[in-house]
Image (spheres, grey):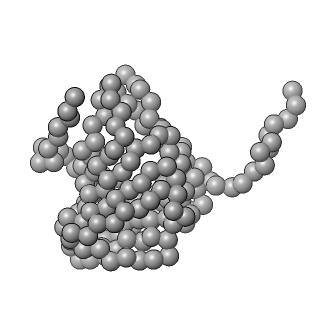
Amino acid sequence: MVYKSNLNEMDWTEMGNDAHIHHARKTLTPFGEDYLPKFGVSLYRLAPGKRAFPAHEHLANDEGILVTRGSGTLRYGDEEIALTEGDYVHLPAASGRAHHMINTSDEELEYFCFSSLVVPEAVLYPDSNKLGAYTLKPGADGWQSSRYIVRNEPVGYFDGEEPD
């Protein structure tokens, strides 16, 4: 089966903390009742000075970013990489480097993000010492996402395993 969508017919959805992290998004990836894709595509829009997400490192999914309008900076580990219209970068999973996009210009920045969709997925947030676990499961209205975010504080393997 072929799934078709049109960016011009989609509404933007917004997410962020209204401080420095905020984006608008159009998701082209189809999630049908009987279809769980292995590849995702979204269009993001960032206002000047905003970051799309907290810095994060995917452990299972590769991402690619294609800038279609404006310019900004990709933070990739300790590097800051200037990106402008037409630039593409590939971000491999489990690279040991967290990343996020920042609009460092005075105009809106738009870019496509392409991603493999391996679930479950674990994501590290090194700036805030968090660990995220993400999964999808079938629900009454199609696939439902579940997200669990915890502080990434080590404990022993047998911690909390007391005898009955």
Q: Quadrant of residue 20?
A: bottom left
Q: Residue at x 28, y 42 (%)?
A: 29
Q: In this image, 94 relative to 15: left or right?
A: right
Residue 147 in the image: above or below residue 49: above
Q: In this image, 2 relative to 18: left or right?
A: left
Q: Is residue 54 visible?
A: no
Q: Percent from the top left, x then y, of residue 126?
A: 56, 63
Q: Percent from the top left, x then y, of residue 152?
A: 64, 55
Relative to the observer, which residue lies in front, 45 or 91? 91
Relative to the observer, which residue lies in front, 72 or 19? 72
Q: Quadrant of residue 2?
A: top left
Q: Quadrant of residue 3?
A: top left
Q: Residue at x 50, y 40 (%)?
A: 120
Q: In this image, 150 relative to 115: left or right?
A: right
Q: Percent from the top left, x then y, of residue 122?
A: 53, 48
Q: Is residue 102 visible?
A: yes
Residue 117 in the image: above or below residue 63: above
Q: Quadrant of the C terminus?
A: top right
